Amino acid sequence: MAIQLGLSDIGTRESRLGSITGYIGDLKELSEQSACGTLRGCARCFSQSSSCLSGCALSQLSGIRDIAVVHHGPSGCSTTGTQSYRVTKQVAAKRGIVNHAVYIGTDMDENDTIFGAGEKLAEIVRTTYERYHPKAIFVSSSCASGVIGEDIESIVDDLRQEIDVPIAAVHCEGFKSRIWATGFDLSDHAVLTSIVKPPKQKRNTINFKNFYESARPEIIKIFAEFGVEPVFLYANATVEELSHLSEALATVCICGTLGNYLGNGLEQQYGVPYIRTINPLGITGFETWLRAIGTTIGKTKEVERYIARERAIYLPRIEALKQELKGIRCVIGMGPGYTFEVSRVLQELGMEVVWGAAWHYDRQYDDGNVPPAMKYLLENNPNFKVSVADQQNFEVLNILNKYKPDLYLSRHPGSTVWAIKQGFPALFVADEYMIFGYKGTLDFAHTVLDTIKNRSFERNLAEHVKLPYTDWWYQQPIGKFLEKA
Ligand code: SF4
């Protein structure tokens, strides 16, 4: 379904993409059912807590330089604001810049939820504008303002007459989707509809959707060899940079789950090509991605020259490590983008993926096709067991106990720590660039070996921790609480 940039709100991933949060089976079944449109998710009759989509939406937006987020909800919802600290303070300081973005909560109380707080919200937006002079303002809803039907859209429409910077309503009521990645789409929709302007001239830039830009210097250097500049989004990007996204040569991303909506939106609305390949993790991913960029921007010779030079440096060293990595049995628990990208890299390095637990699964992306990482695995790699669970750690611990892997890999500390307490070596793949390119793949291989060679920390911790799970739970089938929806 085409992206509807004429509307202020968007459908959830469940309704737009057929995304699911409950499944158990294997990669082949999941992929084949996705491709032919028969995939149906399961519901859980028991579920642990999960995350709110406003975390993804507002942490993305609040990283944009010198903007304001006004989150219309009770004070508890504003804990999302703490996530922006890493980008606006730590990542910005690392780059040597200052980001004056502010995150304001409207602190709705009982009276507000009975009588409404539209006037209070408008006044807070005005005060925010006068006090902080932001370059753009994003006004977000929450469960509470959503339940009472606060008309944020009309309030924002009225404020546009008074405020001369872009201002957008962001409809991120936590209850509207079980899939927190819907928040990424909401942030992209707000940027596309309120900040991006129609193109006036083509620029020598490539839009690069990522999280924390830790490989920024390396990527600037690589792209310079092809005569183009990356524009990193959204952490510490300026509103001015965002307004020109439609003039770029192409859009790429570090993770399809993160970049899909913006990439497809820019392509659909302004004809900016979106590079839809597997992502640049591992050797195959990196080279496939680079070659697609080269073809799109007409720089295939430069890309091949770069690949040949870097292969000569890194491939012998990576090959040498494969002997030690061979046969290491891994369980993965990550968002769907990284679960299926990292699975490919582990298998490429000679390791065995015994189970992949994706926090949700997108049956398709906004272009109507199966995610490339999944398609690639199905066509090229060995099958493995797969589950879909919105970070339900009780299921992860059951999987780990049954399969007893050599290593658990997760991109979420709240999951990794449980594996360690259970006594399994675990790798927190925190940085999105941890397996980026040749050097990242080599470093990652070393990190895996370091993690599994010295197991005393996990052993000691497991001996001194009493977990809340009983033998009864470990004996239950992994999908015990899943029911066909
Ligand atoms: S918007 Fe809803 S789910 Fe999200 S933090 Fe607030 S109350 Fe919780």
Image (cartoon, rainbow, N blue to C red):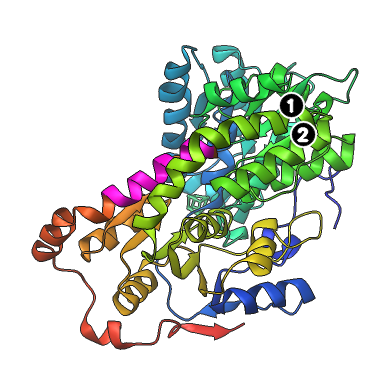
Per the image, the residue denoted by label 2 is 294
- Magenta residues span 438-450
Q: Is residue 1 positioned above or below 65 on the image?
A: below
Q: Quadrant of residue 382?
A: bottom right
Q: Residues within 10 Å of mark 1 (few under 14, many from 20)?
A: some
Distance in Å between CA atoms under marks 1 and 2: 8 Å
Mark 2 packing: few (<14 Cα in 10 Å), some, or many (20+)? some
- Residue 411: numbered disc: none
Q: How many discs mark residues in the rendered view?
A: 2
**Residue 98 place in picture, x, y as percent:** 49, 13
Residue at 60%, 13% (x, y): give it: 133
The type of residue carrying mark 2 is: Gly
Lateral position of residue 394 relative to residue 217, left or right: left
Q: Secondary structure at mark 1?
A: helix
Going 19% across and 53% down the picture, which residue do you hit? 454
What's under tag 1, amino acid-wise? Glu
**Residue 136 visible in the picture:** no
Q: Residue at x 52, y 38 (%)?
A: 438
362 vs 322: above or below: below
The answer to whether one can see residue 177 in this image is yes
Residue 131 image point, x, y percent: 54, 13
In the rendered structure, does residue 448 fall within the stretch colored magenta?
Answer: yes
- Tell me if residue 270 comes above or below residue 222 in the rendering: below
- At a point 13% along the width and 58% down the height, the residue shown is 461
Q: Is residue 99 left or right of residue 449?
A: right
x, y percent for residue 206 = 73, 28
Q: Earlier in the sequence, mark 1 or mark 2?
A: 2
Q: Which mark is residue 302?
A: 1
Taking depth in this image into account, of 274 and 453 the one nearest to the observer is 453
Predominant secondary structure in magenta? Answer: helix
